[in-house]
Image: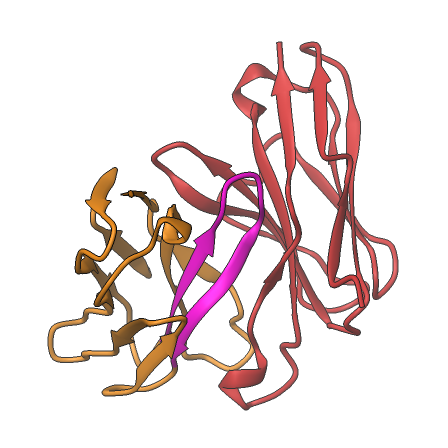
Chain colours: A orange, B red
Amino acid sequence: GNSVTQMEGPVTLSEEAFLTINCTYTATGYPSLFWYVQYPGEGLQLLLKATKADDKGSNKGFEATYRKETTSFHLEKGSVQVSDSAVYFCALRGSNFGNEKLTFGTGTRLTIIP
Amino acid sequence: NAGVTQTPKFQVLKTGQSMTLQCAQDMNHNSMYWYRQDPGMGLRLIYYSASEGTTDKGEVPNGYNVSRLNKREFSLRLESAAPSQTSVYFCASSEARTRTPNLREQYFGPGTRLTVT
């Protein structure tokens, strides 16, 4: 079945540092890949996505590239801010039409220190 | 446009009590989902409903029942709560009936934090 392996946290960085959160997946076919963010006390929000190999998703300064050869979708940001402190989830959706179920990684808690 | 709403936000139950978590969406989506979030486990799918009138088990359905009341509403019921069901519960919805991947995103509600003592 499908699975997502995500970098364990927590991760603590200083403001303006470079961020990478690793995500690798196992799936058949061509899944769609997602990063969700959960701010304290809130639900999950879609941060970015990629639906085919070599696509780059980007939003709010975050980027992730769908690498089929390494089955990875690592999240990066060049200069993090305190407001980026949150829990980040990598997720995939199967490629079959009608299969809408998401498989999530365990989440990575990110704390940015001023 | 409220998106996905959930009630209640917080609930404390004693072992053996029952309760229903409510979820509603105003985006005219066909598919709805219930997840639970536990530390170190990510989100796990409990039940989902691909369309009005249908429901299917997800990864962790034991101890739960669901009802897709109409297109807007999808409720999750705990008949006899157990401490192992202490968790944060999220409802989500998506428009599944399109072959355009970009339109099939799942939108999440704010969650219900449930404690069973």
Most extreme residue toward the bottom is B100
Residue at horizontal 53 percent and vertical 60 percent from the top: A45
Q: Is residue A12 magenta?
A: no
Instruction: Note whether residue A92 is visible.
Output: yes
Question: From the viewer's perspective, is residue B112 above or below residue B101?
Answer: above
Name the quadrant containing residue A36. Answer: bottom left
Residue at horizontal 53 percent and vertical 69 percent from the top: A100
Question: From the viewer's perspective, is residue B42 above or below residue A53?
Answer: above
Between A12 and A26, the one nearer to me in the picture: A12
Q: Quadrant of the N terminus of chain B?
A: bottom right
Residue at horizontal 18 percent and vertical 59 percent from the top: A20
Magenta span dominant secondary structure = strand
Residue A57, image x, y percentages: 35, 79
Q: Is residue A48 magenta?
A: yes
Residue B15, image x, y percentages: 67, 10
Please state the extent of the stretch shown in magenta in the rendering. Answer: A32-50
Q: Quadrant of the C terminus of chain B?
A: top right
Residue B67, image x, y percentages: 80, 49
Name the quadrant containing residue A91. Answer: bottom left
Left or right: residue B104 compared with residue A17: right
Left or right: residue B102 compared with residue A58: right
Left or right: residue A62 compared with residue B76: left
Most extreme residue toward the right is B70
Residue at horizontal 79 percent and vertical 62 percent from the top: B2
Question: From the viewer's perspective, is residue B16 above or below residue B87?
Answer: above
Residue A106, image x, y percentages: 33, 45
